[in-house]
Image: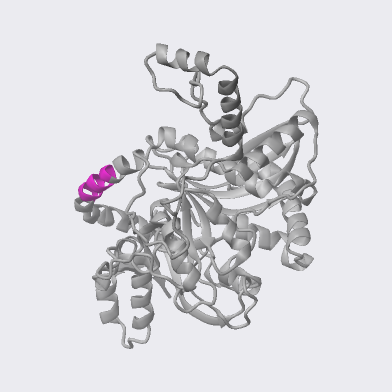
Amino acid sequence: MSSVVEYKGLRAGYHCGYCDSEEGKASCSMWAHSLTVQDYQELIDRGWRRSGKYVYKPVMNQTCCPQYTIRCRPLQFQPSKSHKKVLKKMLKFLAKGEISRGNCEDEPMDSTMEDAVVGDFALINKLDIQCDLKTLSDDLKRSLESEEKKIGKNSKKEDSKELTQSQAIEEKLGSGEPSHSVKIHTIPKPGKGADLSKPPCRKAKEIRKERKRLKLMQQNPAGELEGFQAQGKAPSLFPPKAKSNQPKSLEDLIFESLPEDASHKLEVRLVPVSFEDPEFKSSFSQSFSLYVKYQMAIHQDPPDECGKTEFTRFLCSSPLEVETLPNGPDCGYGSFHQQYWLDGKIIAVGVIDILPYCVSSVYLYYDPDYSHLSLGVYSALREIAFTRQLHEKTSQLSYYYMGFYIHSCPKMKYKGQYRPSDLLCPETYVWVPIEQCLPSLENSKYCRFNQDPEAVDEGRSKEPDRLQVFHKKAILPYGVYKKQQKERSEEAAVLQYASLVGQACAERMLLFRS
């Protein structure tokens, strides 16, 4: 099945849900009737993002709050001290029922409907009615099937080239190196860099150990020194360690064993987003009730904005085509709900997409009664661990995409705390380590992270006439389609679409024209 999309064009000068500007937002959008996971992977690697079947891309140099695609590198991820606190808090709750009422530090992934989606249910509902090709006409289906062989023949030559490229990328991904990453060396600002004339800072614990060691040496200096000299080693202020203390892995912290008489039982279930799936269908009512409770309590949504229709369109309706490959993950590729069941009831749901190179976080909603468990942070750590698990079988699946990073919005900066992570350059679409982007973002909301002035977008549209159009039951190249049109009024929009999706997607995806 080919991807089928309808491009809706640029929309500018509308309300921003991040800075509350009435006319600051600008984005381009399209309605995705269907998307292959490969096409969507390439789209998010060019700054696109989906909410339901609505796919949008912020106009970065125009919008009031630039939204940079952010990804974490799970293979090198080490939980921070605050992450460990959240995991230990969950274990204490499960084991003994202990509840910590301190600072929850809870920031769920994509806790607001992003970009154009914020407060724009009416537009999405209208588009859904206008564009819903869930039941493509028989003629359209037949046409797609008849063209499948032709498209397959034309792509055979590309397959061998893509295979070689994907093998090279796989080797890089297997080694944990980011694909198409750029290393940029920044000069520390005056006063910010380390003073090499001063000794390195030490932790208070190390200083206390040294003092104790010195005290022991003063009490028995000869014996201490003799012991080291007898072994042929220079005197040292610290005794030799019996063995190195390896830090606990993320998995060790998450799956630490619980006592048999544990107070609570937590189970995480991965459920395909499909009403044909019995588990998804049977848990739908409970999942929807949880969504309503979350939206009303956390985001103060009125009841008419979090009904069953909105819930289904945004979080249960996905354009992604399910794919199962021999070398892919056992669960297959597509959209899923990761349900967190506590003592037999759902307390949180993480909506995720499993794509060829990543797990992409779409949304999270949870029971506000369990806010003390920091479920936003906890679910993000579970999704990072899940990505590492999938990587064991599917080596190229190595990244965890966290949606958009908005440096100018304090509530959205938390995503930068999952390290190591990269931001996507909005002009050349290469990945740059976040540490090298932050100094520039402090000076300007909009930044080109790739500091090579000669670098260009390698995947840009170079031959728009090869773009594939679906028009009047036929699939044809745009070069042929435009010759059939008496007016060229839509040419600007088609060329804009091609420039935003890139050459590869423009040639594979079908641009629906009525």
Q: Position of residue 17 (x, y in %)?
A: 63, 72
Decide: is 110 above or below 94.
below
Prevailing secondary structure class for the magenta stretch in the rendered image: helix
Decide: is 231 above or below 157.
above
Q: Is residue 282 visible?
A: yes
Q: Position of residue 80 (x, y in %)?
A: 57, 43
Q: Position of 81 compared to 498: left or right?
A: right
Q: Nearer the viewer, residue 461 or 170?
A: 170
Q: Nearer the viewer, residue 430 or 511?
A: 430
Decide: is 154 above or below 358.
below
Q: Position of residue 291 (x, y in %)?
A: 72, 54
Q: Position of 443 compared to 88: left or right?
A: left
User: Which quadrant: the C terminus?
Assistant: bottom left
Reply yes or no: does residue 31 show up in magenta.
no
Q: Nearer the viewer, residue 494 or 416?
A: 416
Q: Nearer the viewer, residue 238 or 268?
A: 238
Q: Is residue 139 visible?
A: no
Q: Position of 32 compared to 149: left or right?
A: right
Q: Residue at x 59, y 56 (%)?
A: 414
Q: Residue furthest top?
A: 230
Q: Residue furthest left?
A: 157
Residue range corresponding to the magenta coloring: 159-168
Q: Position of residue 301 (x, y in %)?
A: 75, 66
Reply yes or no: does residue 165 show up in magenta.
yes
Would you identify the image quadrant in which residue 433 lies?
Answer: bottom left
